[in-house]
Amino acid sequence: MNAYLEYLIEEKGLRFSTTCRKQQVFRYYLSYLRGKGLVQGDKQLKPIKRVERDAEDTQLTKREVDAFFHAIDQEYAELDSEFRKRVCLRDQIMMELLFYHGIEISELLRLEISDYNRKTAVLKIRRKKQRDRSVYLFSRNLQEQMVRWLSEHEYFEHEEIYCNRMFLSKLGKPISMKMVINIFEKYRVMAGIEKGCTPKDLKNGLGRYAEEMVWEMG
């Protein structure tokens, strides 16, 4: 157990707090084994060493964001299957909602078709612990993409229970957090972005993008 915990924090790079939680589970397990008489003596786990690492800048630059969305645009243009184009369109909309409107991934996954008003281009964001909020999709291109996606949504509707969910998988199931991460990773690699960034960095990237754009304009 000690060796495994050291491996997690030193080689896998898990956070100190995360490894401590895993250690606590092991402690409960050892206590259980002692109670069953399967472990003799008072064996204790070693204290976990806190490994200090230089903070990596995972925030995306304007150049990287442009490359990211260019990779999606390029793939869409090169696809020869209508269904694959629909999948790419879905992915593009999700990534744009994260970036341009700072929507949390959990909020993105809860969106339903009825949350979008095509006439006003207003999207209702459902929140768990706070009041729902509304965002206006200011990009004309994103508005058009949303209309196109909703008109083709039926191709992903395989189970009636999920028909109103905004973003569905190829099998008609709601998109999962892991799928969003995989979609982001796919285009991150295609765009040649080497830093270890996540969809959260894309979500939080608009401020830096705007700053760099102003700087470029002089």
Image: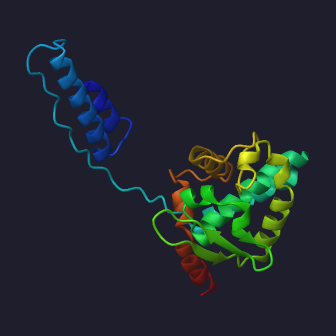
Task: Tell me: 133 left or right of 67.
Answer: left
Residue depicted at 19% across the width and 12% down the height: 38
The answer to whether 25 is drawn above or below residue 204 in the figure is above
Q: In which quarter of the image is residue 63?
A: bottom right
How far across and down, in percent of the image, does residue 212 sit?
Answer: 56, 77
Question: Which residue is most to the left?
Answer: 41
Q: Nearer the viewer, residue 56 or 39?
A: 39
Residue 200 as seen in the image, left or right of residue 120? left
Residue 94 horizontal/vertical position (percent): 68, 59
Q: Residue at x 79, y 42 (%)?
A: 158
Q: Which of 132 and 64 is in front in this view?
A: 132
Seen from the viewer's position, the closer of residues 12 and 126 is: 126
Residue lying furthest front: 161
Q: Is residue 126 visible?
A: yes
Q: Residue at x 21, y 18 (%)?
A: 33
Residue at x-position 31% and y-position 37%: 10
Q: Is residue 76 left or right of residue 174?
A: right
Q: Report the coloring of the rendering.
A: rainbow
